[in-house]
Image: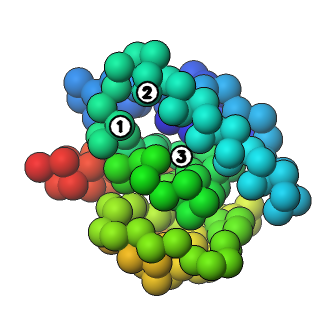
Amino acid sequence: MLHGEGGDEKDFLPIYPAIAPGAAALSPRLSPLSAEAEEVVADAAAFAHWLGHAIEEYKLDAGRIFALGYGDGANLASVLILLHPGMLAGAILLRPQRVVEPNPLPKISSLPILVAGGEGDATMPAGESEQLARLLSHVGADVDYAVAETGHDLSPSDFSMCKLWLSEKLA
C-alpha cells in the first residue's frame, strides 16, 4: 500500500481489509516523489531494493505482490512496473500520472493493472491517468481504466471498484 503526498503509511490500513480480505499488507512510509526524472528512477530503485528485502524477511510469495497506490504512491508503483518489471504481480493505481517513459520500453506480459483517474481531479487530471493507462497497455499490461466521478480525493466507490477488480483478478 503506497500512500500519496501528505499521507503516511497508515492511510490505507482502515480500508485495506475490506478491499483485500485476508491478504498480508506492507505499508511503508514514503518520501514525496521528486519531479526530477533522475531522482524518480533512484526512488524506484530504492523501493525495489526495499521490496525485495521485505519479501525475503517476511517470507512473502513474490508472485502474489500487488501494489495499491494513491497519487504519488501510484506514481511510484507505475515507475516500479516500468523500470523493474517482474517486481509486482499486479497493481491498483488510483489518481496516477505518467512520470517516466523508459527507453527502451519494457515488455510486460499481461500484468493486471487498474488505473483510476478522477473526473474533476485538478492535482492529477484524468487525462494524465489515461496517458499512463495507454503506455502500460502499449507495453503489454492487461489494463483496466476507469474514471471516478470525483476529484483527487478517494471515495467509497473507489474502494468498491478496487475490491471487485482485485477479486476478479485473483479468482
Q: Label 3 amino acid?
A: Gly
Labels 3, 2: front one: 2
Q: Residue at x 21, y 55 (%)?
A: 169
Q: In the rendered image of this protein, does residue 122 appear above or below residue 70? A: below
Q: Position of residue 125 (x, y in %)?
A: 66, 71
Q: Secondary structure at mark 3?
A: strand
Q: Label 1 amino acid?
A: Ala
The quarter holding residue 103 reads: bottom right
Task: Give the Cα distance between marks 3 and 2.
Answer: 18 Å
The residue that mark 1 highlights is: 62
Reading the chain from its start, which is encountered first: label 3 or label 2? 2
Reading the chain from its start, which is encountered first: label 2 or label 1? 2
Colour scheme in use: rainbow
Q: Which mark is residue 81?
A: none
Q: Position of residue 10 (x, y in %)?
A: 57, 22
Q: Which mark is residue 55?
A: 2
Q: Secondary structure at mark 2?
A: helix
Q: Label 2 amino acid?
A: Ile
Labels 3, 1: front one: 1
> Does 34 sit left or right of 85 as displayed?
right
Q: Position of residue 160 (x, y in %)?
A: 31, 48
Q: Residue at x 52, y 72 (%)?
A: 106
Residue at far top of view:
57
The residue that mark 3 highlights is: 69
Q: Nearer the viewer, residue 112 or 144?
A: 112
Check contact, mark 2 vs mark 1: CB within 8 A: yes
Q: Report whether residue 51 is seen.
A: yes
Reading the chain from its start, which is encountered first: label 3 or label 1? 1
